[in-house]
Image (cartoon, coloured by chain):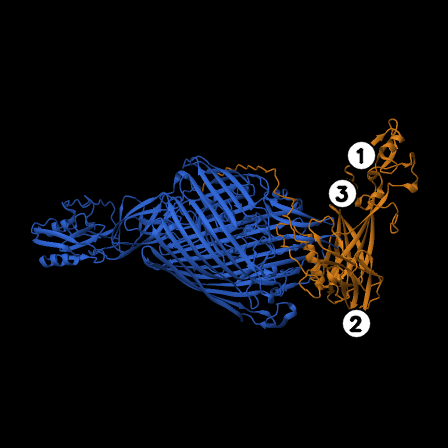
Chain colours: A blue, B orange
Amino acid sequence: MRYFYITFLCIVFFFKPAFSQSGNEKLINVDFKQATIAQFVADIESKTTYHFYYNPVALDSLRITLQANQKPVSVILELALFNTGYHFAINGQEVFMTRGREIKTELSDGFFNNNKPANAAQANVEAFAVDDNKKVVEATAENKLYQIGVTNGTVSTGNLTLSGYVHNVKTGEALVGATIYEPNTKAGANTDPFGHYIIHMPFGKHTLIVRALGMKDAQRQVMLNANGEINIEMQERITTLKEVVVAADRAAMNVQSTELGAMKLSMATIKNIPSVFGEADILRVVLTLPGVTSVGEATTGFNVRGGSADQNLILLNDATIYNPAHFFGFFSAFDPDVVKDIELYKSSIPEKYGGRLSSVLDVTNREGNKKKFTGSAGIGLLTSRLSIEGPIDSGKTSFIIGGRTTYANWLLGLLPAAYKNSKASFSDLTLGVSSEINKNNNIYLNGYYSTDAFKLNSDTTYAYSNKTLSIKWKHNFNNKLYSVITAGVDDYQYSVASTANPVNAYKFQFNIGQANFKADFNYYANAKNSIDFGISSIYYKLQPGTNSPDGSKSLVALDIVPTEQALESAAYFGDKYDITSKLTINAGIRYSLYNYLGPQTINQYAPGLPVTTINLVDSVKYGKNQNIKTYGGPEIRVSARYLINNDLSIKAGYNTLRQYLHLISNTTAISPTDIYKLSDPNIRPQYGDQISLGIYKNVVRSTIQTSVEIYYKRIQDYLDYKSGATLVLNHHIETDVLETHGKAYGAEFLVKKDVGALNGWVSYTYSRTLLQQSNPNAGELINGGAFYPANYDKPHSFNLTGNYKFTHRYSFSLNTVYSTGRPITLPIAKYFYAGSERVYYSDRNQYRIPDYFRSDVSFNIEGNHRIHQLTHSSWTIGIYNLTGRQNAYSTFFTEQGGIINGYKLSIFASPIPFVNYNITF
Amino acid sequence: MKTAIRFIAVMILPAILFSCREAYTPPQITANSNYLVVEGLINTGTDSTIFKLSRTVRLYAKTTTQPETHAIVTVESDANTSYPLKEITPGTYASAALGLSKTAKYRLRIIANTNTHTTYLSDFTAAKDSPPIDSLGYTIQPNGLQVYVNAHDATNNTRYYRWDYVETWEFHPMYSSGLIAIGTQIVTRTPAQDIWTCWATAASTDIVLASTAKLTQDVMYQGIITTVPAVSEKVSIGYSILVKQYALTQDAFNFWQNIKKNTEQLGSIFDAQPSQIQGNIHNITDSTEPVFGYVSAGAVQQRRTTVFYTSWPQGWGQDKSAYNNCAADTLLTPADFERLYGPAPNLIPLYPNPVGAGLIASSRYCADCTVRGTNKKPSFWPL
């Protein structure tokens, strides 16, 4: 038997004096042959006054063969259990039997300066307890044994629950996605978005291995006597600073989780990836992930597994960002100094999310430093950034505020002549306040504001802006149940104005706002079973367009497309259940309900005929808040994982989604001035489902994760537009759009290495996305009703994103992208009309632009690593599009002086060097 | 808070282009389309009605137009009257003013000669007369001369406008010639033989459209017709523009706007995807056959304005790119001249060699303005 040196003791304990080695112990004879524990205990209890406590389940495999004459019980037990992995402890007349771990029955040597027991097995049972206020243990040391719970002399059977928070010791920031792992029992858990974890383990002593992104691996010894809590603080890896990360957190999760098609990236990883003009750009990094494509360089709109760009729910701290782009779409609107990490769900979309068909991109901001004021600043070719964070009161509340602004006008001088007189400006501001009211209640306040204004070589000015504000309350009911209640408002608006011609001077405005409320609950029933449930509701108010005169001379008629209102509500329930240690099922259902609300006038069209103004038969007026149309239905989210071994698993998933909000666009790239439309009696919600299958394998001690995922997806009632459609200020937009359906399928191969000097990922994706408009009643067939490739259909796509650290101060990054050119519609004939050659276009998307290839490199230099200096600085130097390949963004045919000419437009068509200087203080 | 922030502003301006546009040749497109193209207006005013019929050609065909000849083209009214048009040049069918009633609806019937006498018919359309052009003016912009029209319709019915125009401008060739070769004789050029001052004419190639549908009154205020670039030869001496104004139905306006979008307004980052819109002409037996063009009916209004160099900034009209390859050479004797170029006037003598024997000459293209225009002053030219 080993001794345990306990160096830490909780506040209150009770102590029973030891009766060790009592000389008058009764001697008995025993003779067991393959006896079960029940037989063994019954025999000894019949011969002595001892009473045994044990878990029959835990000890049911024990078989005892032993002959002994005139031996004390302690010796018999010792002989019987020698080298079996089972242990015993005697406390007075009580005997405890356990498997795998010993019951600690003594304090450390010399703690009480008591007699040192000669035989631990017969030592006293000591029970330690935290005080009755249940103050949470703050575990900061690796070698201490932390006692959890009160034992009252009995050994708990079954699993106990240990929970708590994992924090960064320096900043007090909650660590998300940290893994807590107990190697002996193989119990494991991850921290939730609030840094909270719940782990289930049997009674006894455990060693917890704790790992988190950018943190030193930590280890905690706990003695689990009862359900309890322990907070763990982790040290940063100082030598690499905050910016450089060696990520190991989800290595095991790749194989172990039930999620398919989910990928999480930390900001540190994102910052290592070279980007145009050196600005760390979240959405551009998303484009390097397998299964994600875009129509080209000029847009940050991304297409996930064949979905359109508006089918992605982009959340910034739970707030919906309608236009996550700056500068016409070239740059993403998230502040790289404030964002902590991003997670993209392509397939297994958790049931708490809904409202979009393709994916959820969850962008999470950092919490402010709770211990001291710090900040960072950066200067790039495009923007300057500043962020400051720090505590507000005594370590409980912190804030973080970050802002960016641009001086990008010089860039526009480099644009083609058509944009020479353009102007652009943008800025964004991010604010976060987090406060720990007490250990069970946390409040988070988040705000975001972005604004863009630009003028594209004409007198027309464009402006758009996102605004969000949300408040989140996290409440722990107990160790097993917590809730997060979020309320917020999100708003997106844009305007287009021109005053050059006083008679035609106008201002066009568009606005979409939503107020949302949701309550999410998480219940850990036991180690095998955890349950998510909740409700949510979003109230939309959409002003599709207001065109008003600008100036007293303007004759522009005030034209207001009536405001639309709708309520999207949902209730969900999801259960993650370990059927066996290898098979886990995550089954969820979400029921979404959509109400299109008055006041509104609804056009009714003759049934069975094309929806055109000619077939308009009636208009019905509805009053305020009157329910005009209800849509809804269940959404299924199921995934399962089967663990073949610790490094290999297969997963399958099926999910269905509904989308009630449409983005209607007839441009190839998402334009800042596209319009949104709520589903109404004439425009049905989009519906999609996806089945996916994946195989996951970790090799080289889980340092390399590999996966292959295949999927097949169907999309229904996706809106396309008719030829010559008018989308802006259209009072009957249903006559200009077509409901199409689509299918997408593909296979994604990924190899990812998170740790080591060389890290990064390689992915190859084969995918197809095909759309079809085959309903002749809709008024117009596209390509004669045949399937045609979507704009973003790029069958082959290859990505290599790598970073190599020469030393802690110098690292080199490489990003290489290859993809098939996107489909385009080409002219097949020409004719002379109205003084010029004109072209006749073929069927839609029957040709492709040339293949795309680009390589970017960057070199990151960290300043010196003395910890105690005023500021830390770093440089990023690199070249975007190293080979200078003139990748086609689009090809087009346009008339000049009566002649039609074909052109190829390339963006970022030559090597673009960049420099970025960052400073943290 | 430690706030000692050391900013080191390093701005390396990449001396590179942000994006570029270059010629593009698509993959070989073999589709051999041969669709009917109909262009013209059923003129209910006092002008003649002219229709041009042609066929589409392959994208890389050398010729753009392939006239549809020997068709039978008639204008029909909903009162069952028909007015035949006569083929005046290959593919052009015309009639003098038809004296059509303003209240009837009209359509065009085409019996094509090719493709086994297929019959094409346009939809009946009401005559829509253009309101008068109130004024045709111009503004001097930094980048050139901007021509605009003002018009209005007190009845608020016109709403959709289209214009086309013909520009005429006075210009000089690269070199002035004071001499003329008559046989082998070089003599002084008389004023009647002047080839220094000419007038060139060009029709519009862009589609010009505007709408007042979003205004409370049907007032077309400074609708921009064209902007003549400041460097253009058109604004070197004198510039004249004749603008014709058409009133369109909404349907016709959509058609024109779509062609404009598909063939003139592409190449931006947020391009609309090209799409085809059917006009109002159909093959009566096969409605899926593409037929290009839109048949409208109505009366046309026109107006001219002429501007001279005194009205625009000095230094405009410097563009001599038409004469990029011009050079003047010294020829020693008139005999050299004929030996080199023969009697045909491919070379124009300019003036005697000021520093020696012989004379200075240049090619006809560089010295004779009649190659690119006419030296007969147009009747509308005011000076």
Do discs 3 and 2 belong to a common subunit? yes
| Camera-side residue of A269 and A707 | A707
Q: Earlier in the sequence, mark 3 or mark 1?
A: 3
The chain letter for the residue carrying disc 3 is B
Judge depth for marks 1 and 2 and give the one in front. 2
* SS at badge 2: loop
The reply to whether residue A813 is visible in this rendering is yes
Q: Earlier in the sequence, mark 3 or mark 2?
A: 2
CB contact under 8 Å: marks 3 and 2: no
Residue A576 % position (x, y): 36, 59
Q: In the figure, B236 relative to B83: above or below?
A: above
Q: Residues within 10 Å of mark 3 (few under 14, many from 20)?
A: some
The image quarter containing residue B321 is top right
Q: Residue furthest top?
A: B356
Q: Is residue B93 left or right of residue B178?
A: left
* SS at badge 3: loop
Q: Is residue B310 left or right of residue A643?
A: right
The image quarter containing residue A504 is bottom right
The chain letter for the residue carrying disc 2 is B
Q: Which mark is residue B231?
A: 3
| Camera-side residue of B302 and A518 | B302
Residue B209 % position (x, y): 73, 57
Q: Amino acid at mark 2?
A: Ala
Do discs 3 and 1 belong to a common subunit? yes
Q: Amino acid at mark 3?
A: Val
Tell me the residue that label 1 is attached to: B327
Q: CA distance from mark 3 to mark 2?
A: 53 Å
